[in-house]
Amino acid sequence: MADVTGISGKYTLPANGFTAPAGKQFKAWSVGGVEKVVGDKITVTANTTVTAVWEAVEYNVTVTGGTASVGAGTPITKATMGTTVTLTAGAAPSGKVFDKWEVVSGGITLADANSATTTFTMPASAVSVKATYKNAPHTHTYNQETVKPEALKTPADCTSNAVYFKSCSCGAISTTDTFVAMNTALGHAYGSDWKYDSTNHWHECSRCHDKKDEAAHDYGSDNVCDTCGYYKTVPHTHNLTLVAAKAATCTEGGKEAYYKCEGCGKFYEDVLGTKEITDLASWGNIAKIAHTTKQTVTKATPTANGKIVNYCSVCKKTLSTTVIPKASSIKLKATSLTYNGKVRTPKVIVNDRTGKTLVKNTDYTVSYAKGRKYVGKYAVKITFKGKYSGTKTLYFTIKPKATSISSLKAGSKKFTVKWKKQATQTTGYQVQVATNKKFKKNKKTVTIKKQKTTKTTVKKLKAKKKYYVRVCTYKTVKINGKSIRIYSGWSKTKTVTTKK
């Protein structure tokens, strides 16, 4: 409602026009702290404030099969919004137990719908709930003495009745309560055949082996019982023969000496026959002796595997064979070296066919040719030892030092090349030219036989043509009585173009 401005006088309090807060309803007007009802008259002589007084709305709580309360208080049928209401289920009908709460109306959420005592928060509307019940569980009473296979505890025997577990009227079987089924003992079942031992005979029950009619054997003029037919054994006198001991070998086990009765076929440890051998196969066995090991070694070579054979010198059996892999890879670490004024000794590397590196001075020795300081071809002899045999000779070459091109001067269909002189271990030089850098096309080679010569002119070339040029040194040496040239590596290639 809007504020009202007027003059002093008497006024009648109107009906409420304000919207009530949630869960509240209009109760009265407050005029100067005094509650007034609608229709009351007030006298206004100064500024006066009139306010609405609100009170909580109580909503119905309907409980079927139980009661509602606040906490543990007395039962209630109404509650204001926000109140925590406790539900308590009533006593269950006969044969029933509490099941759960059902919310009929009000849309509330129960703290535990499966508990006989639970709570909910009152909404701004009426609530209806219902307690439901279910059949109480069955309690077994084992008082039925019913004979049935599934209830059997102890079966009957010849002299005792069967014992069964008691049952409930629902059919369940106890695991502790029992009863004796009278007159169920089976009685003895004696056979008509005689049973016997060396002294007596009797009739025996086939179930419990009880004996009746037991009596001693009655022999007549022979060794046979006239009642049961038992044959009496007459004591045997052994006729023992010595079986000689057998010594063990490396191929077959031995046997200790023993005695055999020629009459009954039994075996004994002693000549008096007091210690019978019941299992001759496992008695008195002597283990095979060890082999007498000898060894033969066939040494490996560079072309064939060797082997180590261990064998028994007595029975000739091969005990083990170990292959010695052949020394299939024999090489020098370097086969071409350049003269440097020092003695050259390239390393020898020997591997067997499995890739294992053989050991110098254990598996082989190495001897080098003399004079390995100068340009020439030299032998290296490998002599095998230990588990290896044979020899292998390898060769390496000491080449003269290379040279380098000092200058190239083009001329008409020719050019002049100069190079650096090599003063030691050099006989002469060789100049090679071609029209491609791989020296495959139009190749021409010029040999200079004097060590002091350091230039030459290559003629009869094509005009205005680019040529590739390289130079090497060589030294003439005698090998096996023959003079051969040993060349250095080539110099760095340079180019020159001839003139017209």
Image (cartoon, rainbow, N blue to C red):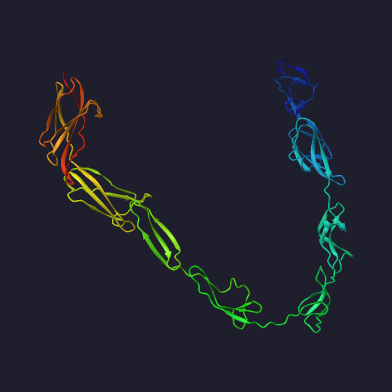
In the picture, the quarter occupied by the N terminus is top right
Q: Is residue 441 visible?
A: yes
> How many circles with numbers are drawn on the protein?
0
Closest to the observer, 245 or 186: 245
Residue 409 makes an appearance in the image: no
Left or right: 309 in relation to 362: right
Residue 298: image x %, image y %? 36, 58
Nearest to the observer: residue 63 or residue 253: 253
| Residue depicted at x 59% and y 71% | 282
Q: Nearer the viewer, residue 186 or 176?
A: 186
Residue 231 position, x and y percent, is: 77, 78
In which quarter of the view is residue 218 placed?
bottom right
101 and 180: which is toward the camera: 180
Q: Where does the C terminus fall, quadrant-wise?
A: top left
Q: Spot the residue most to the left.
A: 452
Q: Vertical placement of 326 versus 251: above or below?
A: above
Q: Position of residue 143 (x, y in %)?
A: 87, 57
Give the image location of residue 42, x and y in percent.
77, 21
When asked about the image quadrant of residue 57, the answer is top right
Q: For this view, does 37 lie left or right of residue 274?
A: right
**Residue drawn at the location 87% of the way across and 53% of the way down:** 169
Apparent side of residue 102 relative to residue 491 in the rendered image (left or right):
right
Q: Quadrant of residue 144?
A: bottom right
